[in-house]
Amino acid sequence: MVVANVDDVLNEIGFGCMQALMVFTCSLTCVFLSNEIMGVGLVAVEIACEFSLSNKQLSLLSSAAFAGLILTSHYSGYLTDKIGRRKIMIYSMVLAMASSIISILMPSFYFFLFWRFMTGLLISGVSVNNITYVSEFTKVKLQSVVVNIMCFAFAFGAIYVPVVAHFLSPLSRILFSWGNFHLRAWRLNMLLNSTPGFIAIILMWILPETAKFLLSVGKEDRAYETLNRLCLKNRGKDLQSLGITGVFQADLPESSAKKRNFFESLWYDTVPLFKPPYLRNFLICTVILSGYFFVGNGIALWFMKLRQIMSDSNMIACDMIKYTKTTHSSSMCSQKTSNFIDGIVLGCVFLACCILISLLLICVRNSYIQLLYAIVATICGFSLNFLKLQLPILIAMVLFSSLLASSIPLISSVLCAVVPTHLRGMAINMSYLFARLSVVIASAIIGSCMVPYCLVTFNIFVLFTLAVAIFTCFLPKI
């Protein structure tokens, strides 16, 4: 009879039906998150037409939810390391869903913008805690694979929104009317986006808190009970029959008797991330993650708008954008079926990239896959300088965005592996804070500079992708 390390216990338990339910539940939270944050970009053309938005206003709308996420990312990371991954996710999902539904009912742009910002503010508690939650119930060797499979849900979300929008677009005329308020197709689309989140909340109530978190806050008995329940579900026998009478976790900090106020505690718990031995790996992961968000999510947010203003001519992408802007500006609100089909293509390619990652992880290191994807993405982005016609440009633009966006789970799993449990939630949330800030910057650059300085804008994104490829060479080999 022994008291075993929690990672050894997870290796002994293996991966079974209980973890599969956790992955499914967290996948639903990913779909909800993708729909709420990125879904606005996929119906941006309809929103811009209803509210008569300029590119700068559309840039504000695309960035609103990310701005909310930025403001609360660090605080939610601090809370998740203090009161638990599961509890924070439940609170966050309920509040974000309420805010999202309120935003749908707003009759004017700036009220809608405010509630999209509030949705981002409130959803931060689930935005990366789902990755932390799943990884802490998975043995180390399977973490990259399981986190990547869970994040297939982001790709399903990217497909789901344009598919629903495609079928609702014929209903772009008024569906229902109450007084001066009109429920249009894009509003109904956004309402349907909340369905996965509602199911996830129900399932989250029956799932346990992670044993690693419970150990980090000194609740060894509850941690043992959680792992024992997991073992019974997966193997049909308890831990005691395997000779395990207790669990512990290495690398936990010594408890301090000194009482601190909130700000002192927040500072005290954050500082270790910026000191050896965590500083180097944390900064490398943060830079790479920011690059993935800057290019992958930045372009995805504007993808539908960019595709709409591209003419079907024998020109490079930037010439198409300038030509259409100057000659066809009056027809920008005429809805084309191909707009949503292009969005579906983007989602399908994103899913294919995620599936390929899962297959490659069987025999290739995590960091090597990231390097390969970054190099191919750089080539695709650079090719936009000279490719002509709609199809080749569509392929290059979709791969440019999807290859980097699909790599986000890979770098997230690396970050989970190099940071200990008591700092993990805060580290991931802080890293994502900088990554989301990069999306706001990317959206502002595209909104302000894409038309007057198109080639310069595209090549800024190419340079960021090249920088990501270089930094990937310095990742720890896991």
Image (spheres, rainbow, N blue to C red):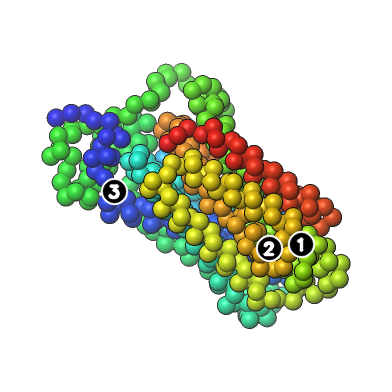
Camera-side residue: 475 or 14?
475
Is residue 79 at all visible to an observer of this figure?
no
Contact, mark 1 vs mark 2 (Cβ under 8 Å): yes
Q: Regarding mark 1 in the picture, which secondary structure is present there?
A: loop
How many C-alpha atoms fall within 10 Å of the one at disc 3: few (<14), some, or many (≥20)?
A: some
Q: Position of residue 79 (x, y in %)?
A: 49, 37
Tell me what residue is drawn at x 53 percent, y 58 percent: 350
How many C-alpha atoms fall within 10 Å of the one at disc 2: few (<14), some, or many (≥20)?
A: many
Number of labels in the image equals 3
- Residue at mark 3 to residue at mark 1: CA–CA distance: 49 Å
Quadrant in the picture for the C terminus: top left
Camera-side residue: 190 or 41?
41
Q: Regarding mark 3 in the picture, which secondary structure is present there?
A: loop
Tell me what residue is drawn at x 60 percent, y 72 percent: 341
Q: Where is residue 317 in the image (x, y as percent from the top left)?
A: 75, 61
Residue 195 vs 331, above or below: the answer is above
Residue 346 vs 410, above or below: the answer is below
> Badge 1 is on which residue?
316
> Badge 3 is on which residue?
15
> Badge 2 is on which residue?
393
First in sequence: mark 1 vs mark 2: 1
Q: Where is residue 251 in the image (x, y as percent from the top left)?
A: 38, 25
Q: Regarding mark 2 in the picture, which secondary structure is present there?
A: helix
Quadrant in the picture for the N terminus: top left
**Tag in front: 2 or 3:** 2
Camera-side residue: 238 or 449?
449
